[in-house]
Amino acid sequence: MEKQEQVEWDDLNKLLQHHGFKPVHFSDPAENKDHSDLVFLDKRSAAEIRTTLRTMLTDSERRQALLHELVKSNNQLKEEVQEHMHQAVQQSQRATKLEGLLDRVKTRVQDLEDRYLSKAVQQHTQQLQKDKQETRKLCDVLEQKLLKQAEEKAQLQRKLYFTVKEEERRLAQQSQTFQNICKKVSQHRSAADQQVLDVIDFYETKMAQLLDELRSVRGESQVSDQNQMKTSSNVTPSFKTILKAYQEQQKENKTQIQQLKREVECLKQELETRPTLKEMKFYKHKLRRLEGLNKPNNMRLPKEDNTPEISENINDKATEANLCAHYHQLLTEISAVVTSPNAPLQLHRQKPSSDGVELAGFRSLSHTLEIWAQQLYLLKDLQRGLNKLAIRLMPLQPSDCAHNSTEPVKVEDMMLLVDSMLENTYTDEKMLRSPTPYTLGSMVSHFQKLFDVTSLSGVYPRMNEVYTRLGEMTNAMRNLRDVLDLDNRIPPAEVVNQVARLVSSSKYSADFHNVLQDADIDSIIVKVKQHEEFFPAFHALITEILKTLGVSRLDSILPALKSLKHTAE
């Protein structure tokens, strides 16, 4: 039993030594007479102690294993965190690259759109110029044709007038001759009467020949031959035969006169349907005035090779009436826009009532449109003047008001520029107490430019840094004035000169070098120069910012600016 207990204690001692503890020693009571140094245990207590120690050591092993697992898990988690952070950095860099690529793509797309629009505008302008030239050529052709038709009309009118007069005179002579012959019916025919009849027959023969020639021109030669045979069958017929032939010839002449009158009426109606020279000039004037206004309707006249067809179509009354009505409606719309109460540079005249006054009003539209175009052209000079004024009034602002000469001038941009100048030059106390977000943004931008701050998040740390250095320089200058017994109102330059004189003097040179050393003097000079350069502007800027934001501490500037930025957005 004692050997088994000894073996158990040996196993326990090995376990204790394995965990770094000292073993339990056993001594013989017979050998050791001093029992005060010994501890007596019965077998039960010894067994409980062994069990307790073994349990504690086992629990310690379990805890050590658990700690080892925790350390391992912690290291693994750290590695995973580092890996995730590395991936996050890579993703951030990739996102930055993608944003840059997107910006370049947007810029490229914008350039392509601008280039395409400019090319389309140029092509459209060339097409319009070509249409304009074709329209002018067509107008010239139509005008020449109208002049020819007017000349033909005048010649036909003169011929018709002389023909009618000659026919009336001949009819009067025939009527008088017939009356004279009728008066002499009851009388006997004498030699003089026979001569008169011969003369009448001769003239009738001549007239028949002339009528035959006229009818041959019109394709009526057969009828004229028959009439000629009837009239020239006998040179000296009887009186009744002559009278009958004369009456038939008179009827034929009346028929011809009626036919000629009908032809004249047809010619008159045809000439009335055609436009006169005055109307043609008026239409040409309208076309020249409305060349620019013909663009929205996308009207394009045919080419020159269809000139005969065009001339035939223009003779149509309905086509001309529709075209004139279209132009008249277009001119009426333009006049309504120009004479509206909201239109700039109003004509200040009454609404026309008659056609002549309406035509004069339409002609006055050209002058008004020319004035408008001149005013729009002068907007570019106004834009350049406003840009120069903005640079002079706001020299500290970024010069983003440069306007490209190829871009159209917008009144909204000029109004925004004027508002910006008013906001920056307005010095009212109420304005200073409640500044606009644009003013605050300009102040922050100026601070970033002065102190080389690239982002908005770096403004507050740079303010603290500058303020700390400013405090150090102020304390150094105050201490220097106290040491040198100088007045507090003496400028820093005088203090630097006094220090330089002390350093250069042989009396205080050694002591001063021992106290400050060369490096300290150089740092003081550098700090004093920095103070002279940056402190006035920075102090004035910080004072204005504090007054504008209504705060008293530097720590409150950045939160106030952030709140204003959120409010503005």
Image (spheres, rainbow, N blue to C red):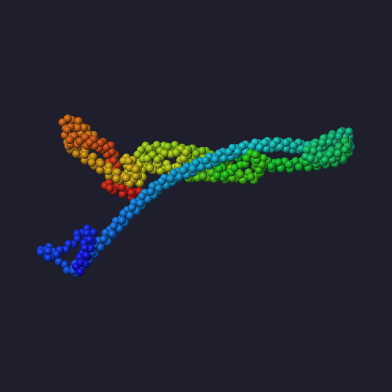
How many numbered tags mark residues here? 0
Q: Nearer the viewer, residue 2 or 158?
A: 2
Where residue 540 appears, as percent x and y from the top left, is: 28, 41
For residue 333, above or below residue 47: above
Where residue 170 appears, as percent x and y from the top left, is: 78, 37
Farthest residue toward the left? Answer: 33
Residue name at image x 27 percent, y 46 percent: 554
Say which quarter of the image contains residue 469: top left
Say which quarter of the image contains residue 391: top left
Where residue 459 appears, as percent x and y from the top left, is: 31, 45
Q: Nearer the viewer, residue 201 or 64?
A: 64
Q: Can I make out residue 163 in this image?
A: yes
Q: Can I make out residue 331 in this image?
A: no
Residue name at image x 76 percent, y 41 percent: 257
Residue name at image x 36 percent, y 52 percent: 84
For residue 502, above or below residue 70: above
Which image quadrant: the N terminus? bottom left
